[in-house]
Image (cartoon, helix red, strand yellow):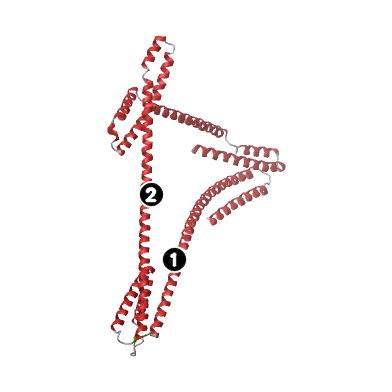
Amino acid sequence: GHLRLELLEQERKYRSSEDQVNTLKAELATLKNRGTQVEVKEILKEVITHKTDPEVQKELEKLREEIVDRTRVIERSDLEIAQLKQEIQAWKDTKPQVQVKEVVQEVLQYREDPKTKQEVESLKAELSEEQRKRLELEKERMSQEDKIRQKERELSQVREKVVQQEVVKLEEDPTLKAEVNSYSRSIENELKQVDTLQDEMRKLQRRKAELERQLEELERERQARREAELEIQKLRIRLNELEQREINTKEKVTLKQKVVLQQDPQQEKEHNLLKLQVEEEKHQRQMLETELDALRKKHITLEKTEVREKLVFTEKVEVERDAETEQEIQRLKASLEEENRRKRELDADIDQLRARMSEMEFDNSKINKELEYLREETHKLQLEKQSLQLEIRHLQSEIEISVIEARDLRNMTQVDRGVDLDSRFQSLTKELEDLKKISRDKDAEI
């Protein structure tokens, strides 16, 4: 990386030198028209000294070639390392033939042992172990088959007697392969079946538990609803009966001559009941329990009222409703309706606030992303500013060098070239001011 930076720096200097040479050539052409041939030749000699050093150019070429050579060496080394890793892995995977025989015997013992099927979990562990061993056995079998094929190719040129002896030695291999393949397939099939059954069992258990929970909840809700409906129905029937009895009782006692005026106990109880309903609506907001409680209390009130009427049955009792109490009842009913309306409005406000909160969270995440993007852009602008500052310093140094060279050329020649050099100096100064302005603009943007 350091060499590449040096190469880029040298190339940039080379291009800058060429630009300066072209500029100076133009100036020399102007001087040539004004001065003598001797002066032009001297200027040409001075310009030639600004060209790139041949030794530096050779060194750059040498560095480029060295970088290419090192890159090729690294690539070859990577290929060799990969090949060596593959060979090492192949040697690690290669097992001695004795181990193959031991693995086959273990598989046979496992299949013939009936104790391995006592528990499902132990069977799963054993099957996993046997599957691993089967994979190792398959690798060893492939290795042995390769060795056998190699040996057969080597023995293909031997006499018939030798071939027959080899065949006799290999007569057991088909049976062994068949048994190994059979046991491997059996183990794999059993393992798959066990995993499948366990997955299905877990899914069914989760589904069963979920259904049972849902059924229990539905049953509880249905039971509670039925009980509430039955209780409400009973209370309404009882209320109708009591109200009918009350009406009948009033009709019967109106035949008496004695009239006693007193406040309606039912009206008083209803007044207290509505107060209780308003308080419960403010705090609990549970309509069904409020209705049940109100009906129970109203039932008790009517029963008490019936008993009192029986106690004073010998007298003429005419109930007259109190106007103030009736107004209070109406006011409490209106207050109850107002509380219900406020509850609905509060629920709507809560829903709106939740929606607003979700929108604000989304806006917050969006703003965070925008802030992150602005931080990245600021960092990029700072890096660009640093790069421009470095370039400005470099251009300042080049301008100073050019000024020194221009002064030297002015001192060396006797021709009046002050106007051209001043214009050159002014152009360089203007370029420097432009670069400073760009730097200030970048600072302001950051």
Q: Secondary structure at mark 1?
A: helix
User: Is residue 133 shown left or right of residue 375?
Assistant: left
Task: Please identify, in this view, whether the residue under mark 1 or under mark 2 is nearer the observer.
Answer: 2
Image position of 252 with respect to 119: above or below = below
The residue wearing badge 1 is 350
Say which mark, if any, is on residue 207: 2
Q: Nearer the viewer, residue 178 or 376?
A: 178
Q: Amino acid at mark 2?
A: Arg
**Image position, residue 419 (x, y; %):** 67, 49
Task: Give the Cα separation between the discs numbered 1 and 2.
Answer: 35 Å
218 vs 371, left or right, is left
Which image quarter: residue 98?
top left
The reply to whether residue 94 is visible in this rendering is: no
The x, y position of residue 328, in whole percent, is 39, 81
Residue type at numbered disc 1: Ile
- Residue 262 coordinates in the image, percent (x, y): 33, 86
- How many marks do you count on the picture? 2
Determine the secondary structure under disc 2.
helix
Q: Earlier in the sequence, mark 1 or mark 2?
A: 2
Q: Nearer the viewer, residue 334 or 151?
A: 334
